[in-house]
Image (spheres, grey):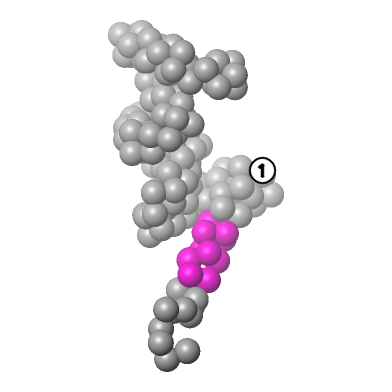
Amino acid sequence: MLYEQRELDSALAYHQQALAIRKKEGSGVAQSLDNIGRVLWAQGKWDDALAHYQQALLICRQLLGEEDLHVAWALKNIGVALQAVGDLTGAAEHLRQSLVIYEKFLGPNHPNTQSVRENLASMEQKNKTEKVKPNLSDSSL
């Protein structure tokens, strides 16, 4: 709710408190890390958000294995974050891994699967377009 109201500093403090509690309880840590990552992302702190998403992925993989929907969600978040900071290779790798898991467990027509597929296709198309742009500063034109 605080996140939706754009009271990001309050939301961040709330999620950090939740993380401290969840660490003591031993469950829900990955979700809290993801929540903190989303708030940091909304604040424009992309590197910090990415670090939280990566921690969440590590925990999900340790607890749930490689093929789990929580892992797919974390991979997607990392892919989107990497795309935003300009690491298109890393972004594509994470989005492809996420897509494989979503397709396996949710099928090709599920909204989560479609969202990742569309994001990946859009990113790849943008990357191709940027590679073939003519150099307008080239004096030979």
User: Would you say 36 lies left or right of 1 here?
Assistant: left
Give, as a three-letter code, the residue at label 1.
Pro
Residue 136 on the magenta span? no
Foreground of the two, 141 or 22: 141
Say whether residue 104 is visible: no
Q: Position of residue 11 (x, y in %)?
A: 47, 16
In the displayed orientation, state which residue is furthest to the bottom. Answer: 140
Q: Please give the residue where the numbered disc 1 appears in the rendered image.
A: 111
Write down the quadrant of residue 44 in the picture. Answer: top left
The spot of residue 107 in percent (x, y) is 63, 48
- Asked if residue 124 is among those painted magenta in the image, a careful observer would answer yes
For this orientation, the residue located farthest to the right is 109
> Taking 6 as reference, is 122 above or below it?
below
Region of the chain picked out in magenta, as a range: 120-130
- Secondary structure under badge 1? helix
What main secondary structure does the magenta stretch of the protein show? helix
Instruction: Place residue 23 in its image quadrant.
Output: top left
Residue 36 visible? The answer is: yes
- Please, is residue 114 above or below residue 63 in the view? below
Q: Nearer the viewer, residue 50 or 64?
A: 50
In percent of the image, x 38 and y 34: which residue is there? 45
Residue 135 higher or lower than 58, as above or below: below
Q: Position of residue 85 (x, y in %)?
A: 39, 49
Q: Is residue 38 above or below residue 91?
A: above
In the picture, which quadrant includes the N terminus?
top right
